Image (cartoon, rainbow, N blue to C red):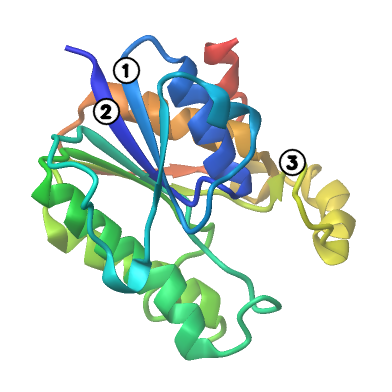
Amino acid sequence: MKKTAWVAGASGLIGGHLMTLLSQHPDYDKVIAFVRKPVDSPWSKHPKVEQWRVNYDDLKTEQTTDKVDELYCALGSTTRKTPDKEAYYQIDVNYPLKFASLGQLHGAQYFGLVSSHGAKANSKVSFYLKMKGELEQSLEKLGYSDLTIARPSLLKGNRQEYRVVEKMSESLLSLMPGNYKAIESLDVAAALIQSAQLQSGKASYLNSKSMQKASLAFS
């Protein structure tokens, strides 16, 4: 039987690629974007796609009681958008956990998360990396049959907003070796979907080095 996937963060860089690749993939017959407001992107026109307007502070699926197979989470903010640390934590940690718990209630077996290179729950130098590490640990405790955590370095791709510092860093990090090397956001999305097909039965981690060029399998 074909699968149903939910995507949180569909309006973002990696989330948009997840929606595109999943809707074009023959193994899926329904791809549902959790959105705060409708998104007008090319993927939104695909017949497999549905958009559900949700409130992450009171997350529920009144639209359906149908089973879901896989969840993909690319939620996240930035310090510039969310300077208040409590609100930042809510978006980057609590909302993904609510999404993951809701998926379990609907039978999901796979959860794919976009985290970050250097994520570490006990980080003393970075609030951002500490958040990501705490989220990873909490997800592991939920007990998904399959959990994949992508830890990309600097993401490359066409964002809706122009980030000067990231653009300046992109050229430098593109020359870096191993897991420090900047990576195309499309490759991260592709690697998460590929991981879902493996059904490893455990938590697995993907770094920038292992995800490079993953999108070639979809071309």
Circle 2 residue: 4
Distance from label 3 to label 1 (Cα)? 27 Å
Indicate the amino acid at tag 1: Asp
Circle 1 residue: 29
Nearer to us of marks 3 and 1 is: 1
Circle 3 residue: 157
Indicate the amino acid at tag 3: Gly
- Counting residues from the start of the chain, the first of labels 2 and 1 encountered is 2
Indicate the amino acid at tag 2: Thr
Q: Residue at x 13, y 35 (%)?
A: 67
Distance from label 2 to label 1 (Cα)? 6 Å
Residue in the foreground of this view, choosing between 178 and 20 = 20
Where 159 sits versus 134, above or below? above
Q: Residues within 10 Å of mark 1 (few under 14, many from 20)?
A: some
- Counting residues from the start of the chain, the first of labels 3 and 1 encountered is 1
Contact (CB < 8 A) between labels 2 and 1?
yes
Distance from label 3 to label 2 (Cα)? 27 Å
